[in-house]
Amino acid sequence: MNTQHPPLQTLQDIKKMMERSSRFISLSGWSGVSAGICALAGATAAWFRLEEYKQTVAGYYRTAPIEMAGRVVDLTNDLIWIAALTFIGAFVSSFFFTWIRSRKNGTPMWDRTVQRLAWNTMLPMGIGGLFLLRCLQLGYFELVAPGCLLFYGLALVNASKYTLGEIRYLGYGQLLLGLLNLWLPYRGLYCWAIGFGVLHIVYGIVMWYKYERATAN
């Protein structure tokens, strides 16, 4: 048994070296948790803004259609700002925790592998952003939430080739919710909160437990 241990250890070391060279393995579970918390905070802010809009414009459709149109524009702008701030908060917090783990593991934050990861993530999200912008311009607001989930899910599945493979399951969850939301168009905020909030938190906890718990101290 003792004579077999060094070769096995050598194979494990080679496997780790190959993973480091082809995959970015320093994604932190806390990144997922922080992104999920930001998403839930954003969804809560959007819900309160929508409730305020519903109460304010009650009856305006018949008595003051012009004023109602103006309030729709204000609502759209506010929701866009909420989404933008939510994205910035999630991105910054995720980057921070990943940067900490990357330093701890001694892996670079920007090399050829990370460049591939970034490209395969941002390409579907960039196309999705243009698609959603056009939906807003045309007034197809019910497609915004499912569109976010679908394009983000595609980005995660596409990027899973260059990072931890488990991230594809998070992508599958986003895709399923996005498809469900297409048939439940008036439940977009709830699907969005589950996909970007709850699933991220669950994913982050699982990843922390699997990869970081043993080295937490």
Image (spheres, helix red, strand yellow):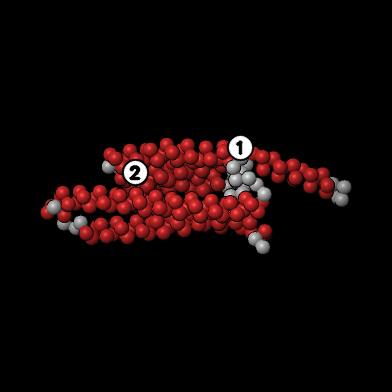
Quarter of the image with the C terminus is bottom right
Q: Which disc, if any, is residue 202? A: none
Taking the spot 23% from the left edge, 60% from the top edge, the residue there is: 55
The percent coordinates of residue 172 (x first, y second) are 50, 45
22 sits to left or right of 94: right
Could you say which is closer to the camera, residue 157 or residue 137?
137
Give the crowd class for mark 2: few <14, some 14-19, many >=20 residues within 10 Å: some
Mark yes or no: residue 61 visible.
no
Q: Which disc, if any, is residue 112? A: 1
Q: What separation in Å lies between label 1 and label 2 (alpha carbons)?
A: 35 Å
Q: Residue lying furthest left in this view?
A: 63
127 sits to left or right of 117: left
Q: Secondary structure at mark 1?
A: helix
Q: Of the residues shown, which amino acid type is indicated by label 2?
A: Leu
The percent coordinates of residue 77 (x first, y second) are 30, 49
Taking the spot 51% from the left edge, 55% from the top edge, the residue there is: 93
Please tell me in which quadrant of the rendered image residue 40 appears.
bottom left
Taking the spot 55% from the left edge, 56% from the top edge, the residue there is: 30
Q: Of the residues shown, which amino acid type is indicated by label 1?
A: Arg
Please tell me in which quadrant of the rendered image residue 137 appears.
top left
Q: Secondary structure at mark 2?
A: helix
Q: Which disc, if any, is residue 143? A: 2
Q: Earlier in the sequence, mark 1 or mark 2?
A: 1
Q: Is residue 11 above or below residue 208?
A: above
**Mark 2 and mark 1 in contact (Cβ < 8 Å)?**
no
The percent coordinates of residue 96 (x first, y second) are 54, 54
